[in-house]
Amino acid sequence: MNLPTTHSIGTPGQPWGEAEKALWRSRQTRKRSYATDVLGVVERLRGCFDVAEYGRLDYPPESFPLFAIRSREWRDDLPCALVTGGVHGYETSGVHGALQFVDLRAADYAGRVNLLVVPCVSPWAYERIHRWNPLAIDPNRSFRDDSPAPESAALMSLVAPLRKRMLVHIDLHETTDSDESEFRPALAARDGKAFEPEGIPDGFYLVDDAEHPQPAFQRAIIAAVAKVTHIAPADAKGEIIGSRVVAPGVIEYELKKLGLCAGITDAPYKTTTEVYPDSPRTTPGQCNAAQVAAVCAALDYALAARS
């Protein structure tokens, strides 16, 4: 893969201003339909689940309703679990894996846990297959008070009443070749920094919470996903994307400090999945199935540990 050394927008070493962000935004084109791919599926799921609009993103001339899917038999005596996808809109299996879990497996957990599933946090980015929102902001570094990203703020508002009741939060992501060829160079240019390639791991991995690690929980998810797709190995430095591998297929981040989605609740069991869809060893169907397997393994482990 030929990697760019500089980005086509901006002046090397100088952060973007509004003119550069406007130029970047003008180059983003709609490539797929949130209404068809996501809202159409959500509408079909209304027959078995409660569906509610929890916010709306207004990016004139467009407006995107945001939807959450809940267990129909919600009970105050049950623990709660949060599944999020599409925080980065370009990460396809995060969105479709979340929807596939609701469609195929969520009913298995009826009466055992209250499920809250938000399949597509960032619909503008989903349609443009991008990491950022139209403000050139990464929602997954913006889960903090007074968030500059409307996507992040809306999700935090939705989850706030349940933050202390969550047993599990699993946030579904992908690491793609375009991270290295497009998104990280753009990030470096936006911030006036030099782009330093890190490499793309070939396989699935997880990001645990460095402040409250749950290694057995992570191992259980890795074991389940390994039956569906391959697990990313450590590189020659014993790292994955610049972070030390603490167990096969597991690295750690300080979730809340970095403003990451997986840090928005007090759930004792939390993780971020990372599927690698560009591998010649996997298919889109396997990527979706890996996300579903990860969600089910997370729920199964947490519920067993609680009993």
Image (tube, rainbow, N blue to C red):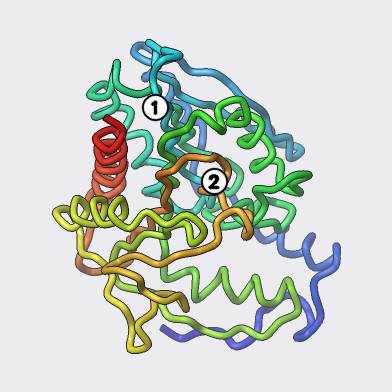
Q: Position of residue 161 (x, y in %)?
A: 61, 25
Disc 1 crowd rating (10 Å Cα; few below 14, some 14-19, many 20+) is: some
Q: Quadrant of residue 9?
A: bottom right
Q: Is residue 37 visible?
A: no
Q: Mark 2 sits on what residue?
A: 127
Residue 287, which numbered label? none
Q: Residue at x 44, y 41 (%)?
A: 169
Q: Mark 1 sits on what residue?
A: 41
Q: Position of residue 205 (x, y in %)?
A: 33, 63
Q: Amino acid at mark 2?
A: Glu
* Residue 166 or residue 62, whichever sits in front: 166
Q: Is residue 240 left or right of residue 121?
A: left
Q: Secondary structure at mark 1?
A: helix
Q: Residue at x 49, y 69 (%)?
A: 179
Q: Quadrant of residue 238?
A: bottom left
Q: Is residue 51 visible?
A: yes
- Work out how far the residue at label 2 is from the one at label 1, CA to CA, in angstroms: 16 Å
Q: Is residue 62 left or right of residue 253?
A: right
- The correct choice, above or below, for 78 with respect to 58 in the image is above
